[in-house]
Image (cartoon, rainbow, N blue to C red):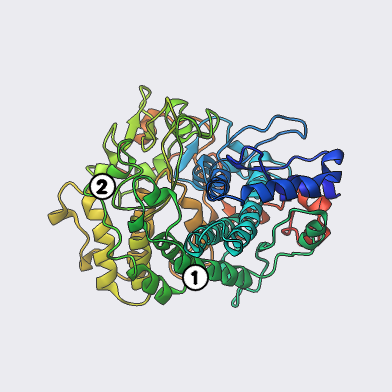
Amino acid sequence: MKNNIIKRGISVLSASLVMVMMGACSEADTLELQPYNNVYEDIAFNTPVNVNLAVMGVYNAAQNGIYKTTPDATNTPRGYVFGAAYVEQNDVRGEDMVNTATFYQLTYTATYDGGSPNNSHYWLNGYGLINKVNITIEGLKKAGETGVITSAIRDNYLGEMYFLRALAHLEMLKHFSRPYNFTTDASHPGVPYRTTAINSPAAIEVGLKVGRGTVAETYAKLLADLDLAEQLTASKNTRSGNAKITRATKEAAVALKVRAYLNMRNWQKVLDEGMKLNAAYVLTATPEIPFIIANNYNNSESVFTIENSANTNPGTNAGLASMYNDRSLVCISPIIWRNSKWLVDDKRRRDTLMVRTAPSGVKFVNKYKDVTNLSDGAPIMRYAEVLLSMAEANARLGNNAAALELLNKVRNRSLANPATQAYTSSSFANVTALVDAIITERRIEFLGEGMRWGDIHRLLYDDLVPTPGIPAKMANGMPTAASFTLGTPYTGPLGVAMIPKTDFRILWPIPNDEVVNNPTLASQQNPGW
């Protein structure tokens, strides 16, 4: 039993110290685990250079986890958990993108099970990242105590680790737990919040006892981590170049709190946290600027992005430009393309800049353009999200004028003629219509950025604009050119039926390997699996 837990939960630092790697341990490896980990962890944190390399290894784990279809298969990169897999999986769980082939078919059609690689690897790599964070937190504290690094450097690194730990747990909640308001006090099962490094046989026994807790408890712990991250991490203004958005910052911690509080429906806290960022970010003049190769790592509105390069990227089978562009494996759905709130002359429809029209007439997202080196960053948070979250919070609190101002702030930069096309107070009959417009704006603005599932999930039990479940979608496969004809909403055939919110398939199952080898989680499997 312990061998499989080690495979999933124990991370060891490589001799080269270039990255933190997931240990895939045989019986012999298990027997030698303690001295092996002791040696490499000691080396990893014995000089300032090595400490920095260890921290960079955690970011590498966030960008590109392992992918194995059989126990003896070669580990291959697939962009788990916050690289390309984050964008692609969260897109195709919704209805606004179409899976054109079979690559993400199980996710798209909700025909996954506990052994399906895409969702089981999400768990594997998510908790692998969390364990690497926890090992690094221990190492950083020791390096600070022994004087290897200064307290200021230690604190900044620690803040980055707390941010990544919170980000990973928040992502797990989105796929493996019901939304916050599923019960009145969020007392339904959350996900295991792991804060202890699993790097020895004794630590495995401790880890086996960590259960799911409640959703309320999980959010409390991740918000505590984000408060620490805000306190300890350096501001983006102290960083230069790509690091402003590819490293966790004080501002990124605040932006992630905005997302967490939106999920929790704590509207006032969304506003309190969001207002902290008013002077930190500015929307770019036009919507395509964050996705131009020369600028997508250095623009005024990106908050946190996972970095890719020619030397380190998710590879052909997961690179964003490969999947969305070169190989055309995920296209825009006519469902959103023909939505009446997306104006015909909206700049986000512009060919070559934001959209790629194939010779067949099918529309594809063109936010990821580097098909050669796959160097496009995977966007995790942009300031536009913060503004739209604040718009929604204001609307729900009855501050309609403030909500309208923030909604237009994001939308107007994409309009051909804001003076005549901007929303006004007369555009909406009631608050439900206003909130619906904000949600639709999120669908348009973040198309192809992995944001849709988060909104579907958090709105399942909403009082104003509830999503009925996993929405009905076009059939898995390439749509016809005629289905993209503008002028009327799409009313054509939907090949994937809606899955009601009460259905067990709303949630992914805890992976088979986990429940087989972990008696605590075996008794806490999601119902129906």
| Left or right: 210 as drawn, with respect to 43 | right
| Left or right: 480 as drawn, with respect to 279 | right
**Residue lying at 47% horizontally and 57% vertically, measured from the top left:** 455
Numbered circle sitting on residue 342:
none
Quarter of the image where one finds residue 224: bottom right
User: Please, what secondary structure does the residue beneath circle 2 have?
Assistant: loop
The 10 Å Cα crowd at callout 2, few under 14, some 14 to 19, many 20 or more, is some
Is 154 or 206 nearer to us in this picture?
A: 154
The 10 Å Cα crowd at callout 1, few under 14, some 14 to 19, many 20 or more, is some
**Residue lying at 72% horizontally and 51% vertically, measured from the top left:** 9
Q: Is residue 347 above or below residue 398?
A: above
Count numbered badges in the picture: 2
**Pointer 1 residue:** 227
- For the residues labelled 2 and 1, the Cα–Cα distance comes to 40 Å
Q: Position of residue 142 (x, y in %)?
A: 63, 61
**Residue lying at 45% horizontally and 55% vertically, measured from the top left:** 248
User: Please, what secondary structure does the residue beneath circle 1 have?
Assistant: helix
Is 371 or 476 nearer to us in this picture?
A: 371
Q: Position of residue 477 (x, y in %)?
A: 52, 31
Amino acid type at mark 2: Leu
Quarter of the image where one finds residue 521: bottom right
Q: Position of residue 159 (x, y in %)?
A: 50, 62
| Left or right: 188 as drawn, with respect to 281 | right
| Left or right: 496 as drawn, with respect to 348 | right
Residue 476 appears in view: yes
Q: Nearer the viewer, mark 2 or mark 1?
A: 1
Amino acid type at mark 1: Asp
Q: Position of residue 144 (x, y in %)?
A: 57, 62
**Pointer 2 residue:** 343
Mark nearer the N terminus (2 vs 1): 1
